Amino acid sequence: MRAVIDTNILISAMKSTMGASHSVLMAIFRRQFVPVLSVPLVMEYEEVAKRPGLIPNLSASQIDAILDLVCARGHEQRIFFSWRPFLSDPDDDMLVELAIAARAPFIVTSNLKHLKPAEQLGITVLEPGSFCHILPPP
């Protein structure tokens, strides 16, 4: 199973070991699904995660280690087309393009409001708790 993971999920997972976002991160480590990645998405993960004070409980090297493992478990997908503009928040368009290019059936996000239109394209948009309920057992 493949899914595109929005940056807000990864950041929440690194901020706290409690909650569904952290469960999504742990599911990546347990190989319960394959995160679909692109170079721009990984760069966004890193840029946001390393904003001063955003994740005070982790050092830059710890953040790098988490991102390295996510990348090692992920599938890199190149995007050869553009669907922009599609969503009301143009920063989220790359998630839809990535899901389409990789034929990933899911986008996992806490931002349902902006990403729900992706369902018109056959992509299921889920919050982390709902996504965890459909994952295969570890």
Image (cartoon, rainbow, N blue to C red):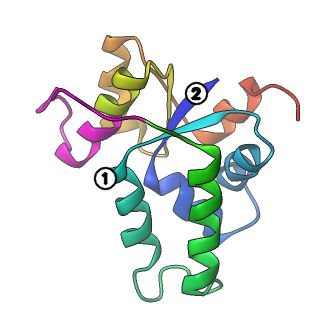
Mark 1, secondary structure of its residue = helix
- The circle on residue 40 is 1
For badge 2, the amino acid type reads Arg
Magenta span of residues:
77-95
Q: Quadrant of residue 7?
A: bottom left
Q: Say which residue label 2 marks.
A: 2
Please say whether residue 98 is one of the residues in the magenta stretch. Answer: no
| Residue 1, image x, y percentages | 65, 23
| Residue 52, image x, y percentages | 42, 88
Q: Quadrant of residue 16?
A: bottom right
| Residue 84, image x, y percentages | 13, 32
- The circle on residue 101 is none
Mark with earlier residue (1, 2):
2
| Residue 48, image x, y percentages | 39, 70
Graded by Cα atoms within 10 Å as few (under 14), some (14 to 19) or many (20 or more), the crowding at tag 1 reads few
Q: Viewed as shown, does residue 112 lie left or right of 82?
A: right
Is 137 situated above or below 66?
A: above
- Which residue is at the front of the view, 116 or 42? 42
**Which residue is at a point 28% across and 43% down the rendered structure image?**
92
**Which residue is at a point 76% across and 39% down the rendered structure image?**
31
CA distance for labels 1 and 2: 18 Å
